[in-house]
Structures are given as structure tokens and as C-alpha cells.
Image (cartoon, rainbow, N blue to C red):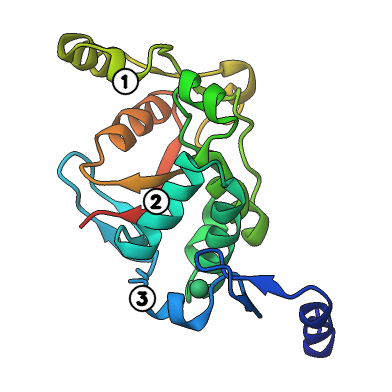
Amino acid sequence: MGLAMESLVDLLFPRQCSHCDTWDMGWLCPSCSSQISFIQSSTKHELRSCSGVRALTQYTGIVKDVLHRTKYEDQPWRLIRFTSAVIENEPDTTWLDEIDLIVPMPGDPWRTWKRGFNPAHIIGTEIARSTKRPVAHPRWFTRTGSKPQQALSMDERSKRYQENVFRLNNRYFGEKEGAKCLLVDDIATTGATLRAAADTLLASGLNVDLLVLSIGL
Ligand SMILES: [Zn+2]
């Protein structure tokens, strides 16, 4: 889109900041944007349980708040706008050219059903849209477990992590051996969940790169 056309679109459809709701030219106003610690996705981080994790922001203040309101106040549109703004702010996404398929981290089925959406799928879809990569359908890569995490005893919890809780549907992935997937999630702290999901993809002969919207460093 040409610059003149872009300004015209901005005039006709002004945007609201995904955090403070101020009317602005973008999905993040300059004030909120200045309070976010952006991270270049070209850098890979070593987490306690997972290495090679790319991230877009640090999990602090405004990022925490946007994710909290998305998940617990039923405002998924905040995450759509926020992800779009963060990707627009990212200076170097050339590494994404090598990605064949964006794979959102499967949500816990019970929680996803209760919420009506999976935050990782929102993030994956936004990244796919702005980088023109394909995104995996939620049925392609799934996660078992129907009890909410809080209702599980510690024994059950650790057992659940020992089990292979992620499942790849070979009907879709069968012919994609060697394809490079980008596994996407909202937050990583220790990276244990990323590791478990990535191992399932790797075991099926796929290559895996990892990206989170925010990282707790
Ligand atoms: Zn703002």
C-alpha cells in the first residue's frame, strides 16, 4: 500500500491502543509503547528447560496486563491488536522467511473450551497474517488433558508432564517431514512446556524454531 493510501486508511479507520484504549494511529500508543521492553526476535535465549527460544517482549507491566485482560476478562481483541503492533515494531523478521508453517502451542482443551479461544492461536495467526506464512489448524497439533490444572494433585500434574501430552495428527503432518515449523506461545519462563511440545514435533521428523510473545527473563 502506498503512503498516501495508508494515511487515508488511518484517517478513515483510526486505531485504539491495545492497552490504554487511546485513539491513535497504531495499536500501541507512544506512551504505552515506551514502557514495553521489546526484544529482537533474531536473538535466541537459553531458558532453564529449553534453549533457542526467540521472544518479542519481556513479560513485564503492560505486556502482563494485556495478557491478563485477554485471558481473564475475555478480551481476545486486545491480544490480536497487541501482537499486530509488536510484530510491526520488530526490526528484523527475515529469519521468518525460512519457516514453512506456524504452529500455535495447543491450548489445554478444557481451558480453551471455557475461554472460547486459545491465546497462542491468536498470536500465531497474527504472525502468520503479517508475515504471510501459513498457520496450522488447531486439530493438526493437539494436547490431551481435560481436568483443569488446579484440580490435579501434584502427583497427577507431574505424571501428566511425564506422559506425552502433545499429539501430532499424522493425517495432516504425514507428508511434511523435514518442514520447518515455528512453534508459537504467549509466555515462556522455564520453557518446560515449549520443550515438551517441540520434542513431539521433532520426533515426527519436523524442524522446530521457537517464538514467544513474551519471555520472563
Ligand atoms: Zn496506550
Q: Earlier in the sequence, mark 1 or mark 2?
A: 1
Number of the front mark, 2 or 3: 3
Classify 10 Å Cα crowding around label 3: few (below 14), some (14-19), many (20 and above).
few
Which amino acid type is marked by label 1? Gln
Residue type, numbered disc 3? Gln
- Circles 2, 3 touching at the beta carbon (< 8 Å): no
Q: Is residue 14 above or below residue 61?
A: below
The residue identified by callout 2 is: 212
Viewer-side residue, 107 vs 180: 107
Q: Mark 2: which amino acid?
A: Val
* Residue contact between numbered discs 1 and 2, judged by CB atoms under 8 Å: no
Q: Residue at x 45, y 56 (%)?
A: 66
The vertical placement of 78 against 104, above or below, is below
Q: Quadrant of the C terminus?
A: bottom left
Quarter of the figure that contains the N terminus: bottom right
Do we see residue 203 in this rendering?
yes
Q: Distance of mark 3 from mark 1, alpha carbons? A: 32 Å
**Which quadrant of the view contains residue 149?**
top left
Q: Which residue is mark 3?
A: 35
Secondary structure category for the residue under label 1? helix
> Mark 3 or 1 closer to N-term?
3
Closer-to-camera residue (163/217): 217
State how far apart marks 2 and 3 are (Cα).
Answer: 19 Å
Circle 1 sits on which residue? 149
Q: Is residue 107 above or below residue 61?
A: above
Of callouts 2 and 3, the N-terminal one: 3
Across and down, in percent, residue 176 comes to: 58, 31
